[in-house]
Image (cartoon, grey):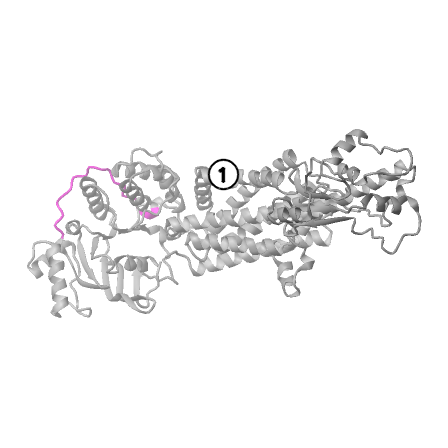
Amino acid sequence: MNSIEVKGALKSYDNKVLVLNGLNLSVQTGSIYGLIGPSGCGKTTLLSCILGMKQLDEGTINVLGQEVSYKNPSKFPHRIGYMPQETALVPELTIKETLNYFGNIYQMNPSLLKQRLIMICDLLDLHDGNKRVNHLSGGGKRRVSFAAALIHNPEILILDEPTVGLDSILREKIWKFLIESTKLSNTTVIITTHYIAEAEKSDCCGLMKNGVLLIEDSPQNIFKNLSVQNLEEAFLNLCIRENTGNNKNSLNDERPQCSHEFVNHKKVKEETKLSTETTKDLIHEKKKKFSNQTIKALLNKELVRIFRQPYEICFTFVFPLLQVFCFTVALGKFSKELPLGVINRDVIDTNFCSEYLKSTNYEFNTSTCTFEHLSCYFLNEIDDKSVKKIYYNSFGEAFNEAKAAKTFGFISISSNFTDVMSQRKFDWQPISENFSYSNQISVYLDHTSLQFSYYLKNKLWKTFEKFNKKMLRHCELDERLEDFPLRFNTFHGELDADHTMLLYPGFVAMAIMIGGILFSISSLSQNRIEGIWNRTLLAGVKTSEVLFSHVIILVFCDLIEIFVIKIATIFLLDVPIIGNQLLLGLFCLLLYLAANSIGLFISVFTSNVAVLNSAGVMVVFSLTLLCGVLWPFEGLHPLLKFTAYVAPLTLPTTTLRNIALKGFPITHLTVYGGFLLLSAWIVLMLFLCYWILKKKRFTD
C-alpha cells in the first residue's frame, strides 16, 4: 500500500519554466523514500505540492488515500509531520516551549506530550531545554526543527534536507531513529538530502533532475541495473544517458515498485526507547472547530515573543510615553526670546529709549495728558521673555537681516509716532488730510513660518492694546474707550486656551492610528517571514484561530498602551478632560482595534518587510492629512470630503474631541457615529483579512 502517490505532476512558475514535468512518484507505507537531486531540480516544490502548499498545473496527488491539492488540503494534518529547509521556528521561544507549542497545536495529550518531549530531546541531544532558539547554532536550530516534526509521532514524515549542518554522529543517530520508526511504528518517511551516501539507507530512492524522476527503485536494484557501486555513480550515469537521449526509463515507463525485500538495513539494537503509540493515541480524538488548546498555544507564543523582544516592549509600552512627552515639550509651545527687529525713527538713536525710561522710572513723566517719546513706552511693553528686540538704524539693514533668517521679522515706527498718537487719542480735534494713523507702526513678518507669524501678530496686538489703556489711565480716561466693539465668548473651551489642550485629542487619535497600524503589521508579518506561519497551518490550525489569537494579543497590548497614555497625560499634560472617562477609554480601544485591523489587512498581501513598512507609512500619512488635525475637514476639496469622512481617522478625531473637551454623551450623533464607523472598519478589515488568508493560506 502506498501512503503517497503522485501521478503526472506538472508545475510551472509564470507559465514559463517547468519545475515538475509529468512526474510520477509512489511512497510505500512504512518505508523511507530518499529523494535525490541537484538544487533547483524541483524537490522542494514537489514536497510543497504533496503538503498542499502549492497547486499543481496538472496531475494528482494522493496522501493517505485522499486526493490533496492547494484547494483541497489534507483532512489529516495531525498524521503528517513536516520539516522545511529553513528552520521555521520562533527565535524567542526556548527548546521546550517550541516543542510544547507544536505539541499543543497538534492537540496532543499533555502527559504523552511530556513523554515524547523527553524522548526526542534525548535522541537529538537537546538537553538544555531552557535555551532560546535564537541562541542556538545553525545545527542546533535544525535539530529543534526536526524535533518539532517528530513531536506528535506522525504516520508520515516529510523532511526537506533534515541533516544539513549536523555532524556525522548525529546524522547516523537520526537515520537509525528513522529506520526504527518505520519498523516499529510503520512510519512513512520521504526525505530529501544532499548527502547521497545517506540515501543508500533508504528503502527506495528517486533520482530527480529537471522536474522528472530519472529512476525510482531500491538502492540495491539501482546498483544492479546500472552496474554501479553507489548512488553518486548511478546519478551521473543517468544524467549522461539523458543528455545523449539513451535514458530508456522514460516518464511513461513502468518503473519497478520499491519493496522491503531489497532493504539492506543492518539489524539495529534498540538503544533508544521508542514510543509505539499511534498518532491517534497521542492526539485527541477529533479536532474541534475552535480548539482552546490551540488558541492557548498561539496566545502563549505571541506573548512570549513580545516580552522577550526588547524593541517590541519599547514600541508597545515606551513609545506611547515618548510620544506624549514629545507632544508636551514640542507642540503648542513657542520658544522664548523670538528675535524681532526694531527700527525706531521716533527717537534720535537706538540707545536713547533705555536711558530715557530709566530717567522717568518707566512711567509717563507728566501729570497732564501730554506725552513725549511714546515709542519708548510702547517698546517697553513688549515682553522681553517672549520677544528679543534687536535694534537697527536703517530699514535696509533690518530687511536684509530678516531675509537672512536672523530674525522672524521687524517693526518700523514712524518719526511722528508720538504726535500722531497724542492727536488721535486726546486732542479730539479735526485732523488734516495728510494725517495717517494706520502706518505708524509697520510690521514685516516671515509668513513661511505661520505659527511664529501668527504668534507675533497676536503678541504685538495685545501689547499695543495694553499700551493704549495705560495712556488712557494716565489721562484719567475710561479704559473701555479702547475696547473693541466685538466681544467674544465661548460655550466650549476658553478664549485663551493653551494650544496643547486644543491639539491633544487630535494628537491622541493620530498616535493611536500610527502605533496601531505599524505594530499589527509587525505582529503578523513576523510569523509569515520566519516560516512559522506555514508550519502552524500545516499542523491543522485554522486561519480563523490564528487571526483570533492575533486580535486577542493586540487587544491586550492596546489596553496597556491606553493605560500608559492615560497615566502620562495625567502627570505630564494635566489635560482637563470633562467627558466620561470610561466612554473615552472605550473609544480609544475601538480606535486602536480599527488601526490594528488595517495593519493586519496590509500585512496579508506580502511578506516583504520594506513593502509592508512603506505601505504602512503611506496609509498613516494619507489618513493624517485627511483627518482634520492639520487642516479643518471643512476646508477639503469637495471630491475628497466623502472619502475623508468615511476614513477611519476623520470622524473619530471629532468624536474624541467631543468626548474629551465637550463632554458629549454616547447618544450624540458625532459620538455614536464615530463608534459605528470604527466598528464597521474593524468588521470589514478582519473579514477581508480572513477571506484573503483563506484564499492565500501559505507564504511563498
User: Dot 1: few (<14), some (14–19), or many (≥20) neighbours within 10 Å?
Assistant: some
Between 279 and 455, the one nearer to me in the picture: 455
Membership of 496 in magenta stretch: no
**What is the secondary structure assignment of the residue under circle 1?**
helix
Residue 447 coordinates in the image, percent (x, y): 66, 52
Between 253 and 268, the one nearer to me in the picture: 253
Secondary structure mostly seen in magenta is loop
Q: Quadrant of the C terminus?
A: bottom left
Between 248 and 188, the one nearer to me in the picture: 248
Q: Tally the numbered discs.
A: 1
Residue 69 coordinates in the image, percent (x, y): 35, 62
User: In this rendering, does residue 227 appear at all?
Assistant: yes
User: In this rendering, does residue 247 appear at all?
Assistant: no
Between 665 and 436, the one nearer to me in the picture: 436
Residue hosting label 1: 314
- Give residue 272's quadrant in the image: top left
Q: Is residue 549 above or below residue 382?
A: below
Q: Which residues are magenta?
A: 263-280
Outermost residue to the front: 348
Kind of residue sitting beneath label 1: Cys
Outermost residue to the left: 227
Going 40% across and 46% down the picture, which residue do you hit? 105
Q: Is residue 246 left or right of residue 13?
A: left
Residue 250 coordinates in the image, percent (x, y): 17, 69
Residue 269 coordinates in the image, percent (x, y): 16, 39
Membership of 269 in magenta stretch: yes
Q: Is residue 582 left or right of residue 107?
A: right
